[in-house]
Every structure is written in structure tokens, then in C-alpha cells.
């Protein structure tokens, strides 16, 4: 089943939004199969945000992402990457649709509370960046047969 990486950024941790974001993930039906708190540093952020490392605002991204520990999670589900990316909403919280995490819980382009992998290929790379294989638990929760119909699996 597809897996995706989520980071609860310092803008979520510091604003006490951990429970709200995780609650929405649980209610939607994405399965949390890896979760831990870690401290990011510039080296890992240069890798993770390689596509932005040359931008003038990159030092601000680093500062905002090392400001407190973060929580990294592995979610699984059918089409988990797309489902969670759509739950996350547009990059800038002021432009994100109401109902999305960013559209409901933040008003900033940078302090935008969550990271969500943007493709299946990147999700694999990002999960390997933040998790050891043994930190991801491919278990089946008891309610699984009420998440999906038989012919979807
Ligand atoms: P997303 O997080 O929606 O996938 P990007 O990969 O484009 O978006 O950007 C990664 C993160 O870098 C954003 O979530 C945001 O925190 C920060 N960022 C992106 N663009 C800007 C910008 N113009 N100014 C400041 N921070 C930015």
C-alpha cells in the first residue's frame, strides 16, 4: 500500500497543533505506520529542500525548520500521497482552500505547519531520509475492513 512522508513543522509544534493535525489524519483514515520527534539541521534540510537551496529565502526556511523539534510520520493508504497532499492544501496558507490543513490552521507561506511528499517517487526518497526501515510498521489496524471496500483493495 502507498506510503507518504509528513513533517509537522515547528509552526505546528510551537502552536500546539500536533493533536489537531494527527486527529484529522486519523479521522480521514490514513494509517500512521511510523512516527517520531527529531531535530532537523541545515545539512538534512539542504537535501530535503534541494529544489529551493539556491533561493534567497532558503536561510529563512532553515531557520523556521530548526526552530524546534519536528514530528515526522509515515502514513499509508490507497493513493496516500495524493490524499494527504490534497488534505494539506496550497503552499501559502492564505491561499489554501478552507477545509485543508493549511487553509484552516495557518495564514503563512512559510509557517505552513506541514510538509507532505508531492509524488510517490519523492515519498520513497523522503521516507528513507527520515526513517530507518525498522521504524516503519506495516501493520493492519483492526478497523481496516471498514476503511476500504473489498474491491478497492
Ligand atoms: P510545498 O511545501 O507546498 O510542497 P515547496 O516545495 O514549493 O511547497 O516549498 C517547500 C517549503 O518552503 C514551503 O512549504 C514553505 O515552507 C517554504 N517556501 C516555499 N516558497 C517560499 C517562499 N517564496 N518564501 C518563503 N518560504 C517558502
Image (cartoon, rainbow, N blue to C red):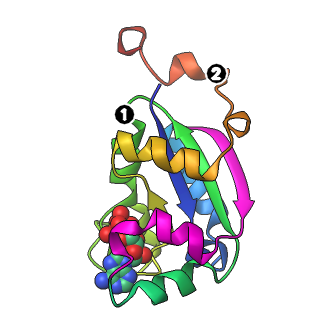
Residues rendered magenta in the picture: 30-54
Q: Quadrant of ligand 1?
A: bottom left
* Mark 2 or mark 1: whose residue is earlier in sequence: 1
In the image, 50 versus 143, the foreground residue is 50
Residue 73 horizontal/vertical position (percent): 61, 50
Q: Secondary structure at mark 1?
A: loop
Q: Is residue 52 left or right of residue 75?
A: left
Which residue corresponds to the image point at 55% horizontal and 60% vertical from the top-left? 7
In the image, 79 versus 67, the foreground residue is 67
Mark 2 Cα-neighbour bin, 10 Å: few <14, some 14–19, many ≥20? few
Q: Is residue 113 left or right of residue 57?
A: right
Which residue corresponds to the image point at 44% horizontal and 31% vertical from the top-left? 2
Q: CA distance from mark 2 to mark 1?
A: 16 Å
Which residue corresponds to the image point at 42% horizontal and 84% vertical from the top-left? 58
The residue singled out by tag 2 in the image is 140
In the image, 143 versus 4, the foreground residue is 4
The picture quadrant where one finds residue 128 is top right
The residue singled out by tag 1 in the image is 79
The relative height of residue 60 versus residue 17 in the rendered view (above or below) is: below
Residue 89 horizontal/vertical position (percent): 33, 62
Q: Secondary structure at mark 2?
A: loop
Amino acid at each position: 500500500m502507498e506510503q507518504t512522508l509528513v513533517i509537522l513543522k515547528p509552526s505546528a509544534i510551537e502552536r500546539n497543533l500536533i493533536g489537531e493535525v494527527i486527529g484529522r489524519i486519523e479521522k480521514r483514515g490514513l494509517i500512521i505506520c511510523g512516527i517520531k520527534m527529531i531535530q532537523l539541521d541545515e545539512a538534512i534540510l539542504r537535501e530535503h529542500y534541494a529544489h529551493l537551496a539556491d533561493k534567497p529565502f532558503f536561510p529563512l526556511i532553515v531557520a523556521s525548520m530548526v526552530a524546534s523539534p519536528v514530528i515526522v510520520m509515515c502514513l499509508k493508504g490507497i493513493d496516500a500521497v495524493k490524499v494527504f497532499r490534497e488534505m494539506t492544501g496550497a503552499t501559502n496558507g492564505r491561499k489554501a482552500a478552507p477545509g485543508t490543513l493549511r487553509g484552516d490552521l495557518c495564514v503563512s507561506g512559510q509557517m505552513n505547519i506541514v510538509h507532505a511528499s508531492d509524488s510517490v517517487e519523492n515519498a520513497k526518497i523522503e521516507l528513507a531520509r527520515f526513517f530507518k526501515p525498522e521504524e516503519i510498521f506495516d501493520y493492519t489496524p483492526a478497523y481496516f475492513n471498514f476503511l476500504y471496500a473489498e474491491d478497492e483493495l
